[in-house]
Image: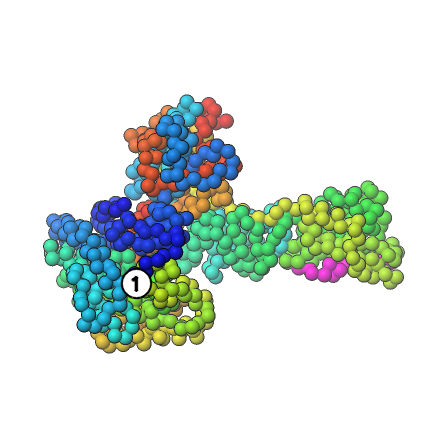
Amino acid sequence: MREPALIRMLPDGRRVHLHDGPIDLIIEANGAPRAVSVAYEAAARRFVSILDELCGELPFLRRPAEKNSKRPRGAVAQRMFAAVEPYCMDSFITPMAAVAGSVAEAILESMTVAATLERAYVNDGGDIAIHLADSYRYKIGMVERPDTPSLFGSLEISAADPVRGIATSGWRGRSFSLGIADAVTVLADCASAADAAATVIGNAVNLPDHPGISRIPAREISPDSDLGDLLVTRGVEPLSQFEIDAALENGLCVATRLREKGLIHSAALCLQKCVRISHASAKAPAGFCRDGFLKCVVCTLDDLTGPAAPNIHAQIELTGRTNPHA
Amino acid sequence: MPDVFPPDTVRCDACPVLCYIKRGHAGACDRYANLEGQLVRVDPHILLDRAKSQGTPLVPFLEREGDWDGKIMKGQETFVTAIGAGTTYPDYKPAPFIVSSEVEGVDMVTVVTEGIFSYCGVKLKIDTDRHLGPERNLVRAQGEPVGHVTTAEYGSQMLSLGGVHHLTGGSKSEGRVTCETLLDRCNGKEVELTIDEGASVRVAAGKPPVVNGQREERMRVGCGSATIGMFAKQWFGKVDDVVVVDDHITGVLSEHQAGKLLGVRETGIAIQGRRSTPGRYFQVAEPGTGWGGTNISDPLTILKPFKTKFAWPHLRLLMVSTTGEQFAYYELDEALRPVEKELPEALKESVGRIRENCEPALTTVLFMGGAGGSLRAGVTENPVKLTDSVKRRLTRVTCGGAPAYIWPGGGITFMVDVTRMPENAFGYVPTPALVAPIEFTLKKHDYAVLGGHVDYVRPLADVLKEKERQRQLVSHAQNPWPLKPRAGSSGS
């Protein structure tokens, strides 16, 4: 039985939760009160049809992208296709690799078109599209693993930075990975590009044929997975420092190449508590902080005051749990 | 698209993605899953069903509909637990479910909420005589300090895990690992713990502990001295002397009061260690994971040469540990040196009986937490009145339907045996803190008196209508029924 899409204000009265099928978005806009409510309404209007649009051409979106092939019809699907196209000559990739980032981007666009906002974000399960005007900035908190509770680092993005999209991929996440990275977090021009790149770099952090890595065909877990019979990572035993370095190096090579091609701005690769950043130069547009290790972006917050950060509340709510007290 | 799927694959129609979901897996949304070939919504709100007879299996709510007799009375046998109930925010809002039901002619109210506990931890009782580590030493999980070794109790070692200082007082990683460890402990999962300068243990609630890779089978029947006392009569005449090796008190039959009274002859046996009273020795060896919780693997190492004045050739000596798991039988040669021999048939029974009298070794886990002002505000506008009502036993506190022991003194600090709660009853929030279900049950009249949110009380039948997110379980056979009204209106 089809469940209707859910649109609701979170109990904090600031953020909106949009849910339909497998899509869960947390959005927040700042600006004049009138502008914010117009933006939220626009987001909701855009949202209600988005899942049906995507599902209308799901079989096509689950097939590997090919250069010069026919294009998808839907606006979101086109973003997905465009985001993965740069990779389709070199590797297996389907437009689904960019679905979360593309949805976030589309919703954010509907908001910024409808109203003049100081800043706004759409967080699609850790793939985040952001809007920043003038001198506004966002501080982003990073969480080690989606299933464990504390923040491990933060980064700041200001309007002057070119970054408008953040995405994270890893084998522990909700979608499958061919690689073994616990998380690859990517900053890019837009969320769809970040999403596709995080998938590609995450796949590259790997140790082919390593006996300590268990992999099974994606189809055995999820019969209609776009990855079909490709082997996806299900478990990684503790690795030696040498092996960790080697796997991260594999990913770093790809990240560096994507950075040279202008596809991403930076990436942080994390494997068993070791972190590599795709660039070390000080003039980096948006740096990852190096305290501790970071694994998965799940929250966007104004004041990163501690682990009781507001957006994590939302995550807890999504799992049907509860609102934590500060 | 594959056309043929394994049997038991279900197609979810909750959204247009129309996932094919294999048995035991969830769909793309993580909200719907294939449980035993049925599409179910996961993370349900759990209701306890009072079992008509013990051992009734778990009953999914929807399957029960067939034998629903249509009367509200049936509903009276259902208790709404707080598992998955969520909580309300900000604090002053009434708890998510305030349920009324009539039980034995009395109107009862149950306030159902999940509590967020920063002040919480677990107390672990590990049944073992093996030395796990010095008192006060740190207990670690994944290398992070998550608790400490506390007192040794009868046949067991207590550990204290968690507590606010580990959860929020240390590094982020310490807090995170502590939270994870507590959650796994409470949800009955196995956890590996290491103790500084001590053992490594794998423990799961209600299961035997595994110490340094060795599974504990039995608790000791008593200390070495007590074992001599219990079995002296059964040994008398069948053997000349018996040493029960124990890290705490090693007992010697011929010197022990029990042996003396039976007239056991002096054997000239001499034991290493500090003599306490006749036939009782402390510190025969270092603590360890060998015989009777000592570090010895060869029991002869605790014997000094036999005194030639008393001993005689062919003297028969049994050495046994307090659990009967280790034993050896010796006879003295002409030079009065013990030589190991096969255990005579006549002694096998007594060794077997020691073993038999040792209860199965278990790890037991009590969750301990304190309900703060915020949680209490969800129950009543004047939180202290709830404390008062609990202390006067007008209000019964349960966790997922399991009875909670309330500590005397201020606040509502309680302990509960996690094995008596339904599975996976605990959650967490990133604070980090644990989320535990808690239910307050009291008479409707008393609820009004303590300033409860009476306008939010809903009849049970109403709550039961929201079937989609509910799961019905059979109440734990040992738990008293949480809704049963207490006699009188004040303490009993």
- Nearest the camera: B391 or A40? A40
Residue that protrudes farthest toward the front in the picture: B4
Task: Please state the horizontal and vertical placement of residue B58, each as a whole percent of the image.
Answer: 45, 41
Quadrant into which the N terminus of chain B falls? bottom left
Span highlighted in magenta in the image: B295-308
Report whether residue B389 is seen.
no
Q: Is residue B112 visible?
A: yes
Model colouring: rainbow
| Residue A252 part of the magenta-drawn span | no
Asked if residue B127 lies left or right of residue A296, the reply is right
Which residue sits at x=87%, y=62%? B335
x, y (%) of residue B258?
A: 78, 43
Does the segment drawn in magenta span residue B306? yes
Image label count = 1
Is residue A46 shown above or below B480?
Answer: below
- Residue ID at (45%, 34%): B50
Residue B303 or residue A84, whichever sits in front: A84
Estimate the x, y position of residue A168 in percent, counting from the top left.
30, 63
In the displayed structure image, the side of residue A205 where residue B255 appears, left or right: right
> Which percent across, then down, holds residue B361?
60, 49
Please indicate whether residue A257 sits to the left or right of residue B239 in the image: left
Which residue is at a point 45% across and 43% down the rendered structure image?
A: B422
Q: Amino acid at mark 1?
A: Asp
Q: Residue at x 73, y 51 (%)?
A: B244
Q: How busy is the neighbourhood of tag 1: few (under 14 within 10 Å), some, or many (20 plus)?
A: many
Secondary-structure class at tag 1: loop
Between residue A62 and residue A194, name the one nearer to us: A62
Residue that carries the numbered disc 1 in the rendered image:
A226
Q: What chain letter is assigned to the residue under label 1?
A: A
